[in-house]
Image (cartoon, rainbow, N blue to C red):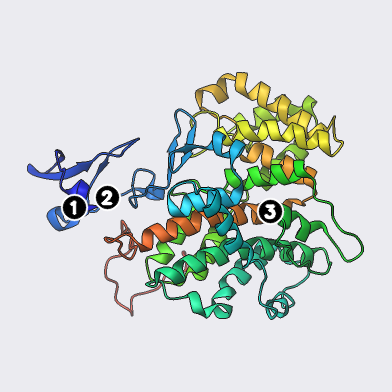
Amino acid sequence: MSKDKNSKKEKFAKLIIDNNSYSFPIYSSTEGESVIDITKLHSKTKFFTYDPGFTSTASCESKITYIDGEKGILRYRGYDIEELADKSDFIEVVNLLIYGDLPNKSQLTKYKNLISRHTLLHEQIINFFQGFRRDAHPMAMMVGVMGALSSFYQDTLDIKDAHQRQEATRRIVAKSSTIGAMAYKYSIGQSFVSPKNNLSFSENFLHMCFSNTAEEYKVSPILAKAMDIIFILHADHEQNASTSTVRLAGSSGANPFACIAAGVSSLWGPAHGGANQAALEMLEEIGSSKNIKKYINKAKNKKDNFKLMGFGHRVYKNYDPRAKILKKICKKVLNHVGINNDPILQLAMDLEAIALKDKYFIEKKLYPNVDFYSGIILKAIGFPPEMFTVIFAIARTAGWTAQWTEMIEDPIQKIGRPRQLYTGNLITKYGKKRSRKNTR
C-alpha cells in the first residue's frame, strides 16, 4: 500500500490459529469495502489463504474505477458512467482513465491529435494478415496482430521510460480500431480501408468497417454516437478477468503490446467478452415471446444446460447501470435504421419484463447486464456476432492501458505469483507400478 496509508494503521484484524494470535492491518478505501493486508500472512503463520477466482481478494490498489454492485454504480475516476456517456466522447474518457481527470478543451484537442496520428498500421502488417485463413475468427486476428505490434514498434518497448509508456498507450488505443476493422474486412473478403484522421474515433471505426472501394460509407451521427457510447461503457470495469490478466502479464516486465494481447485472449472467453454474442444467440434460439416461459423454466432447471445469457453479473446485484443506458440507445438505433418492430428487440423487452417480475430471478438478483442490449445494437448497426467481442476489446484498450500504466508506476508492484492448495500425490518412486486411470 502507499506510504500515506501505511502511516495510518489504526485498525487491525486478529487471526487465531491453534491458540496463537496474529494481527494484520486494515486499510480503508475512499469508498467501498476495506481490506485486510495479508502480505505477511505466510511469513507469520506458514499459511496461505484459499480463494478460487479471487472473489474475496484485492490484488492491487487502484484509483481508476469504482463499482458498487449492490447499488448499481459504475464510476471512472469518480465520474458516473451515465454522465460520461451523455457528455463525453470515447477519447476524452481514454484521457480521463489514463491521466486521472478530464482534460480541458486544448488538452483534449492535443490528445485527439496524438491518438489520430497513430491510426495507421505498418504496411507490412498487411502481409501478416494474409497469413490467416479467411474463415479465422476476428478475435484470433486481434490477438495475433496486437501481440505482433511489439515487433513493428520497438521504440516504445522500454517500460521504464515514461515517454515510451505514454506513446505505447496511444498506439495501442489508436491502432486497436484499425486492427479490428481490418479483421472484419479480411473475414468478409474485402479490401482494407485506410483510416481518416478528420473523423472522430467512432466515426473512423465505422468508416473503416463499412466503406469499400465501390462506395463511400456515409457515417450517421446517431450510429456514431451509439458506437461511442458502447466504447465508453466498455472502457474499463475494475479488476475483471482480462484486466487482471493484463496486470499479471505486465508484472513480469513484459512489453505493453504483449500484455494487451494477453488481455484480448482473456476477453475472448464466452464468460467474459463473448457474453454479448452469446446473449444475442440465446434470443435467436428462444425465437418468439411465446417461448419465454418455456425457456425461463429451462433456465431454472439445474439439470438443463440452457443458460439465460445477459442476466446477472459477478459484481452487480442490481440493474447494471450500463444496461440502462444501452436500453435507451437501442430504441434510437433501431428506429434510425428502420427496424421499428424488430422481433428480437421485442423479445428482449418481453423477456426482461417477465424475468424482473419472476420470483426466481428476484431472489437470485438476476438483473439485465450490459450484454443484454449491446448485441442487438451492434447487429442493427451491421456487425456480425463474431465482431462483438472485437469491439469490446477495442473499447477495453482504454482501461487496460490505464491499469497497466498504474501498475508500472506503483512503487510496491511485484511480479504476480499466486499460491495453491496442493492435493496431489506424495513422493512417488519412479519404478512404482503405474495406473492408467488418469490417462486423458
Badge 2 density bin: few <14, some 14–19, many ≥20, Cα 10 Å:
few
Q: Which residue carries the number 1 mark?
A: 41
Which is more foreground, mark 2 or mark 1? 1
Query: Horizontal and vertical percent for residue 273?
Result: 59, 50
Numbered disc 3: secondary structure = loop
Q: Is residue 242 visible?
A: no
Image quadrant of residue 369?
top right
Marks 2 and 1, the one that precedes in the sequence: 1
Circle 2/circle 1 CB separation < 8 Å? yes
Marks 3 and 2, the one that precedes in the sequence: 2
**103 vs 298, nearest the viewer:** 103
On the rendered structure, is 207 left or right of 302?
right
The answer to whether 214 is drawn above or below residue 269 in the figure is below
**What residue lies at 46% left-to-right and 75% top-to-bottom?**
157
The answer to whether 262 is drawn above or below residue 382 in the figure is below
Q: CA distance from mark 3 to mark 2?
A: 48 Å
Query: Horizontal and vertical percent for residue 394?
Result: 61, 56
